[in-house]
Image: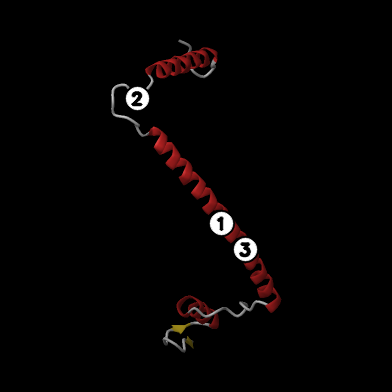
């Protein structure tokens, strides 16, 4: 019988004790040693990735600023400039909406008539 030196739990063999030590007490296993060269390579790769990440973050900040600037400009364009009746109000254009609706309907009819999956009308 093997006993845990930290908590006193008992195990049948050394393998059970080793698993308990890894899981409960966060101790590395017997084969968990990493060579210094490997650690150095990992550190170099990590530093390169951090450099790339900082470059991307800078690019994302520039993109964010450009998008916000564009959105502010669009919001200014959409604001009504005058409350008087002589000012042309920007609103919903029913002519364009009806034209687009008719176009989508014609495309839908054409697709249904040539489709082998959908029944023809």
Q: CA distance from mark 3 to mark 1?
A: 11 Å
Say which quarter of the image contains residue 71. top left
Sequence order check, earlier mark of 3 and 1: 3
Left or right position of 87 against 109: left
**What's the mark number on residue 120?**
none
Mark whose residue sits in front, 3 or 2: 2
> Is the residue 79 above or below the residue 88 in the image?
below
Measured as percent of width and height from the top left, residue 102 is found at 44, 14
Q: CA distance from mark 1 to mark 2?
A: 41 Å
Which residue occupies 54% across, 17% down?
A: 116
Measured as percent of width and height from the top left, residue 63 is found at 53, 48
Mark whose residue sits in front, 3 or 1: 1
Q: Residue at label 2?
A: 89
Q: Residues within 10 Å of mark 2 (few under 14, many from 20)?
A: few
> Is the residue 110 above or below the residue 87 in the image?
above
Which residue occupies 52% across, 19% down?
A: 117
Q: Residue at label 1?
A: 58
Q: Residue at label 3?
A: 51
Q: Nearer the viewer, residue 46 or 75?
A: 75
Q: Nearer the viewer, residue 20 or 51?
A: 51
- C-beta proximity under 8 Å, tags 1 and 2: no
Q: CA distance from mark 3 to mark 2?
A: 51 Å
- Judging from the image, what secondary structure is the residue with disc 2 in? loop
- Judging from the image, what secondary structure is the residue with disc 1 in? helix
Which residue occupies 48% across, 41% down?
A: 70
Q: Quadrant of the C terminus?
A: top left
């Amino acid at each position: 019988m093997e006993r845990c030196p930290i908590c006193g739990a008992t195990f049948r063999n050394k393998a059970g004790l080793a698993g308990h030590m890894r899981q409960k007490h966060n101790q590395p296993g017997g084969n968990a040693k990493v060579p210094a060269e490997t650690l150095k390579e990992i550190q170099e790769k990590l530093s390169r990735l951090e450099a790339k990440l900082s470059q991307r973050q800078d690019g994302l900040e520039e993109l964010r600023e450009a998008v916000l600037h564009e959105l502010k400009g669009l919001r200014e364009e959409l604001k009504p400039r005058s409350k008087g009746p002589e000012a042309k109000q920007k609103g919903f254009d029913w002519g364009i909406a009806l034209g687009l609706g008719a176009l989508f309907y014609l495309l839908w009819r054409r697709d249904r008539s040539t489709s082998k999956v959908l029944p023809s009308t």
